[in-house]
Image (tube, rainbow, N blue to C red):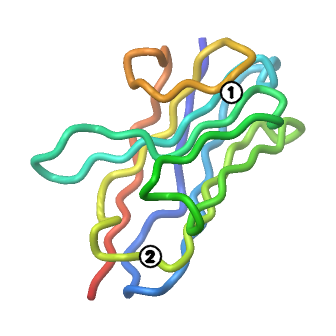
Amino acid sequence: QVTLVESGGGLVQAGDSLRLSCAASGRTFSAYAMGWFRQAPGKERESVAAISGSGGSIYYADSAKGRFTISRDNAKNTVYLQMNSLKPEDTAVYYCAARGGTKWYIKSYEYDYWGLGTQVTVSS
């Protein structure tokens, strides 16, 4: 069982940056692939970025490429999402997710554990 707690969301202006964190329980964090998803009102949940257990393999959605960076610190059981040059269309609830595995995964149904989410609001 893995418990995930996101933090770092907030209200920012377009062009600003935020760093989201997701702290995970458990002793084998490196055995879990991690992903960041987001869901805007009236829209489906979508993958933003994903990272393998070792951190050596990373995926970004097109919307995140060049602006967002996913990373993890296995010693701290934490995965991060650095978001730069934020846009109003980045406004959403951001969730982190975990599943066992050695690669990254981008479909929400592929993940077993989810956090409760953190709100990111970007004003224009």
Label 2 – label 1 distance at C-alpha: 29 Å
* Residue marked by disc 2: 86
Residue 111: mark in rendering:
none
Residue 96 on image: x %, y %? 51, 38
Q: Amino acid at mark 1?
A: Ser
Q: Amino acid at mark 2?
A: Leu
**Left or right of 105 on screen, residue 32:** right
Q: Residue at x 84, y 36 (%)?
A: 74
Given residues 25 and 54, the one toward you in this image is: 54
Sooner in the amino-acid sequence: mark 2 or mark 1 = 1
Given residues 50 and 121, the one toward you in this image is: 50
* Quadrant position of residue 92: bottom left
**Left or right of 112 on screen, residue 109:** left
Callout 2–callout 1 Cβ contact below 8 Å: no
Quadrant occupied by the C terminus: bottom left
Q: Residue at x 41, y 53 (%)?
A: 118
Discs 2/1, front: 2
Local crowd size for mark 2, using a 10 Å CA cut-off: few (<14), some (14–19), many (≥20): many
Residue 29 on image: x %, y %? 77, 25
* Residue marked by disc 1: 25
Secondary element type, mark 2:
loop
Q: Residue at x 75, y 34 (%)?
A: 57
Q: Residue at x 33, y 52 (%)?
A: 93
Given residues 62 and 90, the one toward you in this image is: 62
Q: Is residue 67 above or below residue 100?
A: below
Residue 71 on image: x %, y %? 73, 49
Q: Is residue 102 above or below residue 116?
A: above
Outermost residue to the front: 62
Local crowd size for mark 1, using a 10 Å CA cut-off: few (<14), some (14–19), many (≥20): some
**Left or right of 73 on screen, residue 6:** left
Residue 7 on image: x %, y %? 53, 55
